[in-house]
Amino acid sequence: MGLDKHGDEMFIERRGVIGAFLRSLRRGRDGLRAARRGRRTYKQRFSRLAFLLAAIFLFCLVAFGLNMFLHGKMEGRTSSAYEVKVADAVKEADAVKEADAVKEANIGSDVGKKPTTKHRKRHLPCEITLSDSVDNIVEPSSFMNFTQFSLHYIEKEENSFSIPRFGGHQTLGERETSFHARSQKLHCGFVKGPARFPSTGFDLDEKDKIYMNTCKVVVSSCIFGSSDFLRRPTSKRITEYSKKNVCFVMFVDKETLSTLSSEGNIPDDRGHIGLWKIIVVKNLPYKDMRRTGKVPKLLPHRLFPSSRYSIWLDSKMRLNTDPMLIIEYFLWRTKSEYAISNHYDRHCVWEEVFQNKRLNKYNHTAIDEQFLFYQSDGLTKFDPTDPNTPLPSYVPEGSFIVRAHTPMSNLFSCLWFNEVDRFTSRDQLSFAYTYLKLRRLNPDRQFYLRMFKDCERRAIVKLFHHRELPVPASP
């Protein structure tokens, strides 16, 4: 029994050892399985992360490539749109001469560029109260009692060392003296040279001179170089009195006369086309047609020596109002001897200089020389807030001018023409300087110049565009 018991105990003990060993093996196997499961889970997580990163990278790559493609398409589209806009702007700048005003701050960067806007301001006429009939108007008895002095003009220069010029060879000393409102002899165009030299220009037929010398009231215009169409005054709005007593004179050159004839505008036996008396100018004094046009525009008192009143009308306009009603409204009613409208947009010469350069109206160097000269002689900026500013604007719209041929009016016209002859043909640049200097040097002799609103000008005439012409060569 003891042996069996001992044997049983031994068996139990062995079984305990073997069980422990088997359990140890089982735990080891379970741990190995757990380790294997852990490694498998890690590999799965790593694969998922790698796949996610690859997917993100691929997405970014596709998005970047698509963005580059679309950017290129949009850039090409923007460039095309810009080119279309520029083309449209260039066409508009060529078709429309009157460009909108610009600010001085842009002067440095925008000179020479064409306007980029297609939308222009609309400038409309305003209501004016003309007299009901020419039968109801009478020239005031004392109207011509303005500042009185005598003017004589230099007809000939004998200097054989220089080529004769239509405007003569005025020295700076003579120029300075001419601004004094007193009896004097001054340059005012139509200057001839010595006998051996040919005419300096603006030659007229003797019959036409005789006709012009009979005119007391004149409406004049001009077309040189076929620069415009012929626009006849609206006959039904011109009274019979004015048709009989007012001279309507259109100055043309041979080229323009030929063009007008080809368009069906042929002068009748009296030399008229409608109300216009056509007068042909031979031997034009300047190569620049615009400068030549300043002769009838600024010197009507020289062309019509017997006239008392004159109305200048640019060729881009059609007269829609009786001239006697115009004279009564702008001169007699306000006791003025010179009337001109202000510019529709610009009022300062600085703006006008910039705009002329921006649109390449004239050689930039010539404009700068003239402008610097004027500044050195006292020209200042227009200040609308200054109550002592003598004019409502320093820039005129010179296409419509009404004048009484008084001594001060004639002197101002000569002085203004001399500036156009000496410097650029852009008369808007020299208007304010000429007026202010004349006023400054003659404080006791008033010049009754009226600058009226542009909308009043538009109520009197109908505006058109000029013919398309190349920019004239600058001297």
Image (spheres, rainbow, N blue to C red):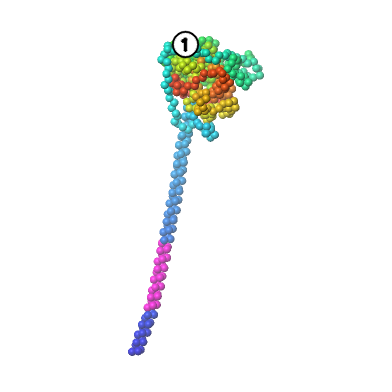
Q: Position of residue 418 (x, y in %)?
A: 58, 20
Regarding residue 282, the answer to whether it shows in the image is no
Residue receiving disc 1: 245
What residue sits 56% from the left and 18% below the top?
Answer: 444
> For the C terminus, which image quadrant?
top right
> For the N terminus, which image quadrant?
bottom left
In this view, 335 is above or below 7: above
Q: Position of residue 100 (x, y in %)?
A: 48, 29
User: Hey, which residue is sitting farthest left in the picture?
Assistant: 1
For mark 1, give the secondary structure.
Answer: helix
Along the line of sight, the residue nearer the viewer: 20 or 336: 336
Q: Position of residue 403 (x, y in %)?
A: 50, 17
Q: Could you tell whether 19 is left or right of 424 in the image?
A: left
Q: Count neighbours of disc 1 (C-alpha within 10 A) and say few if under 14, some if 14 to 19, many if 20 or more.
A: few
Q: Is residue 269 magenta?
A: no
Q: Range of the magenta residues?
A: 19-44
Q: Could you tell whether 237 is left or right of 405 in the image?
A: left
What residue sits 40% from the left and 68% below the top?
Answer: 34
Along the line of sight, the residue nearer the viewer: 116 or 51: 116
Mainly helix, strand or loop, the magenta region? helix
Q: In the picture, residue 118 is in which quadrant? A: top left
Q: Position of residue 177 (x, y in %)?
A: 61, 19
Q: Could you tell whether 171 is left or right of 1 in the image?
A: right
Question: Which kind of residue does numbered mark 1 sit on?
Answer: Asn
Along the line of sight, the residue nearer the viewer: 396 or 208: 396
